[in-house]
Amino acid sequence: MGDQLGNLIGGFGDALTPMNLMWVFVGCLLGTAVGVLPGLGSSMAVALLLPITFTLDPIAAFIMFAGIYYGGLFGDSTTAILMNTPGNSTAIASTFEGHRMAKRGRAPQALATAAIGAFVGGILATILVVFFAPVLADLATVFGPAEYFALAIVAFVATAAVVADSAVKGLAALAIGLSLAMVGVDSISGASRYTFGVPSLLDGIDIVVITVGLLAVGEVLHVASRIHKDATVTAMTISGRPYLDRREFREALPAWLRGSAFGLPFGAIPAGGAEIPTFLAFGLERRLDRRRKHPQFGRGAIRGLAAPESAANATAGSAMGSLLALGLPTSATAAIMLAAFQQYGMQPGPLLFTRNADLVWALLASLFVGMVVLLIINLPFAPIWAKLLLIPKPYLYAGITVFAVLGVYAASSSLVDLILLVLIGLIGFMLRRYGLPLAPVLIAVILGPLAETSLRRTLAVSEGDPGALLDSALALSLYGLLALGILVVAVNKVRNRAKVDI
Amino acid sequence: MVVWTVVAVLVIGAGLIATARSGGGDSARARLAVIAPAAPGGGWDLVARESQQALKSEGVVNNVQVVNIPGAAGTIGLGQLADMTGQGGTLMVTGTVMVGGIIANDSDATLADVTPIARLAEDFEVIVVPGDSPYQTLDELLEAWRADPPGTAIGGGSKGGTDHLLAGLVAESAGIDPTQLNYLAFSGGGEALNALLANTVTASISGYNEFADQIEAGNVRALAMGTRERVEGIDVPSLGEQGVDVELTNWRGLVAPPGLSDDQREQLTDIVTEMVQGAAWQDTVARNRWKDTFLTGADFEQFIQAETARIQDIATELGIGA
């Protein structure tokens, strides 16, 4: 362990030059900018900047990438909180309580909570990577399709906490999500499903299009339809001090830590990205909240925002670990970073730490530097970002629409995607209009394909024997955990009913 | 901050739109668009961005833009290229995967609808088993595979892609019914590697470069390279050496829109030839561990035809496409 510390200090020595600090600052600004905008993500930013960085020396380039990588995750919650339109799918769970906080005049506090949460999650994950990257890499190897399926089922049930208000509406929304997720070529059989002969649909509907359509465009349409009828839809004030006070900080701290605990293991396994842990973290906080004397969920609970934010960045941090130690890109951004590393003759994988030690430690050090810079950039700007809300609503929402459409078009230069964006936006509007929850749609889009593919892969390997689903200790313990959870909920329900009856 | 964000975004956005619009009728020397028919970060995207870099640094073309048109194994991009009749300022990256993708997706546009310019380089395929697998040689693997075809899961990239096609070729050559092939498609080398290390699949087929370090570290064992002859500099026996007489490599090339004049075609060929001869591109080839198999003109056109016919055969046997 002393070795790692020495190496890391050496890495800081390489990373902390005035020139490199400037690059990390540029990267952080760019990452935050693309993170804020619906549709543009950090994977896009890294891809666009790849050619520019060819002319930089490797350490400067990595430092800039580190800034962009985490910057996107700091930025994506800003519009999620202020305007209910997340910049990326990793911030979906942050919209639920984050936007409610903003509606109650606590936008600056919400932004600060998100920034600190992203910082806590990222720092914890990076520390873990520094000391335990090889162990983290081993985690991925115990996950076969049977384990992924168990994981997807557990996540489905656990996130049902978000769904559970009305079972019928929740299931209807879930069905919409599953249908959207089913579009495209089935990866197992190669058959195309619901593509209606449109070649552009063969790869399915991009999660970015669904997120931006449902949340951003849907919200814009909803606000536009109510703006002259119902002042409360858009009325938003900023009140109170712009910073977190000690009580709020104490309240958020355990949620930040719990969120990180969800995110850390998820980054190491290539399953569906950072969305699942954010939903799991949110679900847990909500469940814990219901046991408290004065439940706050539904009215802008700080914990409901803190947990998913730290979960998202913890996932990103440990994803970096499995990229470096195993060469396993567990997210889109990681895949592009992998290409970037290869540009500099670095082949992430088991031999990286011995072969390119200097570069790796400089990169790890720059992850820390990037995170600190991001916190410094984001905290003081929270009250300024919140001032966005003072822009007259028609201009603000017109601006969101422009950026949403621009982002989606930039990612694919596809007209079909734009049409889909509008159609899904209309679906999002109808769901809001008739009071159907949006979260189950997104949960289904993310978890549905994971559950389906892993179930069918398990059965393909076992030649159709369903016993294979239970043929592993890890899968069994995941199901055990699930059964236990259901039991606890059921017992609580029965007890509560008994109380009411008496 | 807000202002800066807006400025940054407008600059990025304007760049993107300009990128998407470029590639009109201008001279290709002044301005060239290279279409990567895949999302940023993939193999074709890499070829496009490496070409962009090499063209710029050698001063062959000053203004080179990369445009990503992802989807359906590159056939979305192919369809759009086939509609750009006569536009001499556009190139698109193509390769083995697109030949399979055209068949698998029953694409309207085929490589016969565009103008072939050049084959650039090849990547080799490798057959690997987990490090703790009981199979030490290809023969041992094939024996077990023959004994129980459906029970031997083979992992690799997408259905109809290079990995899947090679699995079919090997099975057929080893006397295993290709229709009984139990092939598990994974999205990308990372997922395929994960499945191999978790012992989900018996063996996996993938690009050699993706697995090279894992092989060296002993996490996985390479049984055969997907070639007839031994590959120079790689200490793994070829399929041909072990009595399996098939070969499939992952080649990457460049094609242009249809309906070009002879002058336009010649100009694009000259541009690519100059690029390939430059030091920057040679460095790219070495860095990515590709094999330079540059081929232009009628030779490349014949190569595409032969490749299409060969892949069509094996795809039909594997039940891919209509």
Image (cartoon, coloured by chain):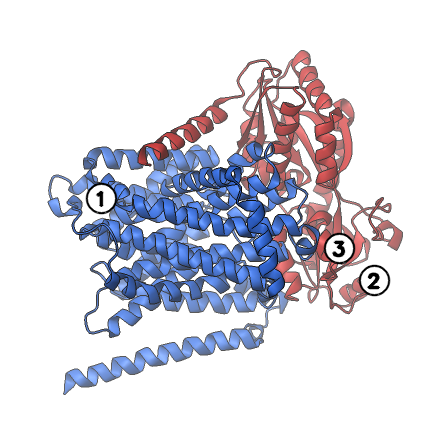
Chain colours: A blue, B red
The Cα–Cα distance between marks 3 and 2, rounded to whole angstroms, is 11 Å
Q: Is residue A404 above or below residue B154?
A: above
> Dividing the image into 4 quarters, which one contains the C terminus of chain B?
top right
Q: Is residue A463 above or below residue A368?
A: below
The amino acid on which the numbered mark 3 sits, given as a three-letter code, is Ile
- Tell whether A234 sits left or right of B284: left
The Cα–Cα distance between marks 1 and 3, rounded to whole angstroms, is 54 Å
The spot of residue B5 in percent (x, y) is 36, 35
> Circle 1: is it few (<14), some (14-19), or many (20+) Cα within 10 Å?
many
Q: Nearer the N terminus, badge 3 or badge 2?
A: 3
Q: Say which chain tag 2 marks.
A: B
> Circle 2: is it few (<14), some (14-19), or many (20+) Cα within 10 Å?
some
Q: Is residue B104 visible?
A: yes
Q: Is residue A327 above or below residue A417?
A: below
The spot of residue A68 in percent (x, y) is 47, 43
Residue contact at pointers 1 and 3, CB within 8 angstroms: no
**Residue A488, located in which quarter of the rendered image?**
bottom left
Q: Residue A476 or A326: which is nearer the viewer?
A: A326
> Dividing the image into 4 quarters, which one contains the N terminus of chain B?
top left
Q: Is residue A40 visible?
A: no
The spot of residue A277 in percent (x, y) is 42, 61
- Tell whether A156 sits left or right of B52: left
The residue lying at 81 percent from left, 46 percent from top is: B227
The lab-note entry on whether marks 2 and 1 share a chain reads no
Q: Find residue B65 and name its label.
A: none
- Which residue in the protein does label 3 denote? B127
> Circle 3: is it few (<14), some (14-19), or many (20+) Cα within 10 Å?
many
All told, the count of numbered labels is 3
The amino acid on which the numbered mark 2 sits, given as a three-letter code, is Thr
The amino acid on which the numbered mark 1 sits, given as a three-letter code, is His
